[in-house]
C-alpha cells in the first residue's frame, strides 16, 4: 500500500528548494521573510554569474512547533546574474545588518527578468538575470532564535 506524504514527514529536515518560475519563487520568498544577514554576507561571483547570501533564516515552516522559536543558516543563490544594482544599502558600512522582507520577480522577454531582494528600511538589491533560477539550502542545524520571539509585522 502506498501512502501520501504527510506534512509531519518533513519535520526537522533541512530545506533545499529551487525556484524556476514565479510560483516557486513565492515559496522561497515566504520562507526567507525576516531573514537577517550582515551586509558582508552578500557576494556576487561575476565569472560564475552567481549572487549568493548567507542568511539567518527564521524557520517559518516550523513556527509554533518549537518553543522558543528557531532560526537556521541558509544559502540563497541566484544564478545567471548579468547585472547587480542596489539602493538604500551602504555596502561600505560593514556593520550593517539587513532584514529580508521579500523576493520579487519581474519577467522580461525570452525568460530573462529581474529578481529584487527587498530589505527593511527601503533597501533593495536588483539582479538582472538571463533566466530565473534561485536556490535556498539550509547549511546548519537549527538554533534558538536570539530574540526568543517570532518576527512580527504591524498590520
Image: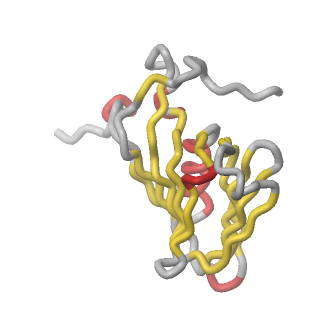
Q: Which of the two residues, 116 or 54, is positioned nearer the viewer here?
A: 54
**For residue 105, what is the image quadrant?**
bottom right
Q: Left or right? Give the position of 11 relative to 111.
A: left
Q: Position of residue 71 (x, y in %)?
A: 48, 32
Give the colour scheme shown: secondary structure
> Which quarter of the figure is the N terminus placed in?
top left
Q: Left or right? Give the position of 44 relative to 135.
A: right
Extreme residue in the left direction = 1
Residue pictured at 53% horizontal, 23% vertical: 146
Residue 109 against residue 119 in the figure, above or below: below
Q: Position of residue 103 (x, y in %)?
A: 66, 54
Extreme residue in the bottom direction = 110
Q: Left or right? Give the position of 113 relative to 56.
A: right
Q: Position of residue 38 (x, y in %)?
A: 60, 46
> Which quarter of the figure is the C terminus placed in?
top right
Callout count: 0
Q: Position of residue 88 (x, y in %)?
A: 81, 55
Residue pictured at 59% horizontal, 44% vertical: 37
Q: Which of the two residues, 37 or 106, is positioned nearer the viewer here?
A: 37
Residue pictured at 50% horizontal, 21% vertical: 69
Residue 75 against residue 68 in the figure, above or below: below
Residue 84 against residue 13 in the figure, above or below: below
Amino acid at each position: 500500500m502506498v501512502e501520501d506524504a504527510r506534512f509531519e514527514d518533513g519535520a526537522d529536515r533541512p530545506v533545499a528548494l529551487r525556484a524556476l518560475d514565479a510560483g516557486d519563487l513565492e515559496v522561497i520568498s515566504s520562507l526567507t521573510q525576516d531573514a537577517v544577514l550582515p551586509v558582508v554576507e552578500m557576494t556576487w561571483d561575476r565569472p560564475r554569474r552567481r549572487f549568493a547570501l548567507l542568511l539567518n533564516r527564521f524557520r517559518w515552516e516550523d513556527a509554533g512547533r518549537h518553543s522558543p522559536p528557531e532560526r537556521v543558516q541558509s544559502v540563497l543563490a541566484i544564478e545567471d546574474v548579468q547585472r547587480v544594482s542596489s539602493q538604500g544599502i551602504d555596502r561600505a558600512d560593514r556593520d550593517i545588518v539587513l532584514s529580508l522582507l521579500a523576493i520579487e520577480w519581474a519577467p522580461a522577454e525570452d525568460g530573462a527578468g529581474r529578481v529584487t531582494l527587498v530589505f527593511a528600511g527601503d533597501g533593495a538589491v536588483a539582479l538582472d538575470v538571463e533566466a530565473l533560477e534561485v536556490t535556498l539550502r539550509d547549511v546548519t542545524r537549527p538554533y534558538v532564535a536570539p530574540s526568543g520571539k517570532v518576527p512580527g509585522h504591524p498590520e
